[in-house]
Image (tube, rainbow, N blue to C red):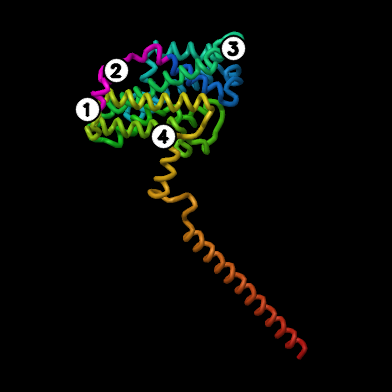
Amino acid sequence: MELLSSLSLDDLAVSFSKLPVFPLFDVAYYIISILYLKYEPGAVALSRRSPVASWLCAMLYCFGSYILADVLLGDSPIHYFSNNANILLASAVWYLVFFCPLNIFYKCVSFLPVKLVLVGMKEVVRVRKIAIGIHHAHHHYHHGWVIMVLIGWVKGSGVALMSNVEQLLRGIWKPETNEILHMSFPTKASLYGAILFTLQQSHWLPISKAYLIFFFTLFMATCKIYMTATHSHGSPFALLENLICPILFGTANGDHNGHGEHQHHHHQDDHEVSHSSAKSKEELNEGTRKRKVKKAE
């Protein structure tokens, strides 16, 4: 903390943590979220065939994290829909992305330099949501570390975690695409961020919340802007995970002994079955020979 104070970042971090996200950053969040919806196969056709279903999908993309967090905390899942200004802004963005004449709005916001700015602004909202989720969960469960991490994680990546529900609205069922089975970078980063904010909230991490929001937002925005600019689907955590995960959890094909033992038992079973078949065949031949001898006598 003394090093950070010597860099004169106190005022900057505090001012950044108090920066209001409504409406400018929220609009950027809605634009990028609904752009990702439009990239989904069949999303444009669905908007023409069933605008209501398309609008519901867009609302899940924009507010899925709030809905899932409310469900987990026992609140009404439609509670956030009482925020009329946010709903109207998200609905306006949905209409412009899908139905603007000549696709002018879509072409403007998907223009790479503009899109990179919007992606960075979306990460500002994401980190703020994680911090608010941790604070909200701490208010309900002061010592529930797991609950705090879970709510913070859901706040940061609830849209991805609810992707199968959104797919059902589009008439698609792909359980193999479950986000928990195949975590994307934002989902992993939201989980790690939720752990950091939980440690900070519980006073186990010696850093102020303003500094944590500032530096984690800087990290998230930098990574997402780089990944968007380079069209990369990798993860900055991959190198560290490849080093640590085999030590802690083993490898996916590490059960050589069990596999070999299974093959050994399977070979023994096959040998016993073949031996039994040969024995039965021998007994059958012996019985046939005795009947022939008896008949001849």
Between the residue at mark 2 and the residue at mark 3, the CA separation in whole angstroms equals: 39 Å
Magenta-drawn segment: 1-26
Mark sitting earlier along the chain (4/1): 1
Depth check, mark 2 against mark 4: the one in front is 2
Residue named by callout 3: 103
The residue at 53%/27% (across/down) is 230
Where's residue 21, x and y in %?
Answer: 36, 15
Between the residue at mark 2 and the residue at mark 1, the CA separation in whole angstroms equals: 15 Å
Where's residue 294, x and y in %?
Answer: 73, 88
Mark sitting earlier along the chain (2/1): 1
Q: Which mark is residue 2?
A: 1
Where's residue 13, x and y in %?
Answer: 29, 20
The residue at 37%/24% (across/down) is 218
Residue named by callout 4: 188
- Disc 4 secondary structure class: helix
Depth check, mark 4 against mark 1: the one in front is 1
**Amino acid type of the residue tagged 1 in the rendering:** Glu
Q: Identify the image quadrant of the C terminus.
A: bottom right
**Amino acid type of the residue tagged 4 in the rendering:** Lys
**Amino acid type of the residue tagged 3 in the rendering:** Asn
Q: Magenta stretch mostly in which secondary structure? A: helix
User: Dots 4 and 1: beta carbons under 8 Å?
Assistant: no
Q: Is residue 20 magenta?
A: yes
Give the crowd class for mark 1: few <14, some 14-19, many >=20 residues within 10 Å.
Answer: few
- Would you say 187 lies left or right of 134 here? right
Residue named by callout 2: 12
- Disc 3 secondary structure class: helix
Q: In this picture, is 263 found above or below 73?
A: below
The residue at 55%/21% (across/down) is 38
Q: Nearer the viewer, residue 17 or 259?
A: 17
**Amino acid type of the residue tagged 2 in the rendering:** Leu
Question: Which quadrant would residue 270 be assigned to in this image?
Answer: bottom right
